[in-house]
């Protein structure tokens, strides 16, 4: 059994949302979403451009220029999509921290082989390890997702010992909860 108390800071919440953004946007689901929203207009533009180039006698050079332009447009759209997505996640992190009433609130937690209990003066949660759908981890944060992509518990590593993080990780693995993350 592991037990402890930590206080979430705004920096912890921002780090958690940054991890959530990276694990979701660069997972199979996120990349598929980028492809669905961005690839079809580029493919449509490429097809139309090649059709026009062929009919107007631009030949291979014109087709190559149209292909290069379509790739450039795709990269620009993907960059904008990621930038706006990251901006949205940062905004959500600030709003969550301010509206969630977590400023300066101590969170007391206990982990056993059965699950994780966390409580504040206003909230108590009990989750069996098998209730979690997935988990993600980086150097600052351990996220325990109970619904994807944005419902998770934040465990800041600065407030929990390395031994307790390892214990939680082992409980998650034993419960066959999948770890998610960017494509490797």
Image: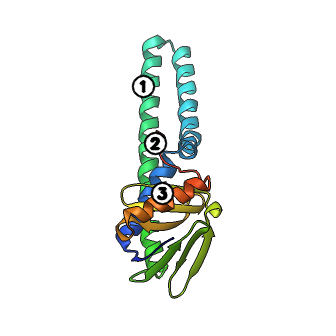
Residue 184 position (above or below residue 138): above
Q: In this view, does 152 lie above or below 33?
A: below
Element under disc 3: helix
Q: How far apart are marks 1 and 3 (CA)?
A: 33 Å
Q: What element carries label 1?
A: helix
- On the image, the x and y values in percent for residue 63 come to 47, 18
Q: Verify CB contact (< 8 Å) between mark 1 and mark 3.
A: no
In the figure, residue 141 lies in which quadrant? bottom left
Which residue sits furthest front? 1
The residue tagged 1 is 68
Q: Mark 1 packing: few (<14 Cα in 10 Å), some, or many (20+)?
A: few
Q: State the residue at coordinates (34%, 67%).
A: 158
Q: Residue 20 carries which label?
A: 3
Residue located 49% across and 76% down the image? 109
Residue 157: x %, y % from top left: 38, 64
Q: Which of marks 2 and 1 is nearer the N terminus?
A: 1
Q: Name the residue under label 2.
A: 77
58 or 88: nearer the viewer:
88
- 14 relative to 8, above or below: above
Question: Mark 3 or mark 2: which is in front?
Answer: 3
Position in image of residue 152 (x %, y %) = 54, 65
Q: Which of 106 and 27 is in front in this view?
A: 106
């Amino acid at each position: 059994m592991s037990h402890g108390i930590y206080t979430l800071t705004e920096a912890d919440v921002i780090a958690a949302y940054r991890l959530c953004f990276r694990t979701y946007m660069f997972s199979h689901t996120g990349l598929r979403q980028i492809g669905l929203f961005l690839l079809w207009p580029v493919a449509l533009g490429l097809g139309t451009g090649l059709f026009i180039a062929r009919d107007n006698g631009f030949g291979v050079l014109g087709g190559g220029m149209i292909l290069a332009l379509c790739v450039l447009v795709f990269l620009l759209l993907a960059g904008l999509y990621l930038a706006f997505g990251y901006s949205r996640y940062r905004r959500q992190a600030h709003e969550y921290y301010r509206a969630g009433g977590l400023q300066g609130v101590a969170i007391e937690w206990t982990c056993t082989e059965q699950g994780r209990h966390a409580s504040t003066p206003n909230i108590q949660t009990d989750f069996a390890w098998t209730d979690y759908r997935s988990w993600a981890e980086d150097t600052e944060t351990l996220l325990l997702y109970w619904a994807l992509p944005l419902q998770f518990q934040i465990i800041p590593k600065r407030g929990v010992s390395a031994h307790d993080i390892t214990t939680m990780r082992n409980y998650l693995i034993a419960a066959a909860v999948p770890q998610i993350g960017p494509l490797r």
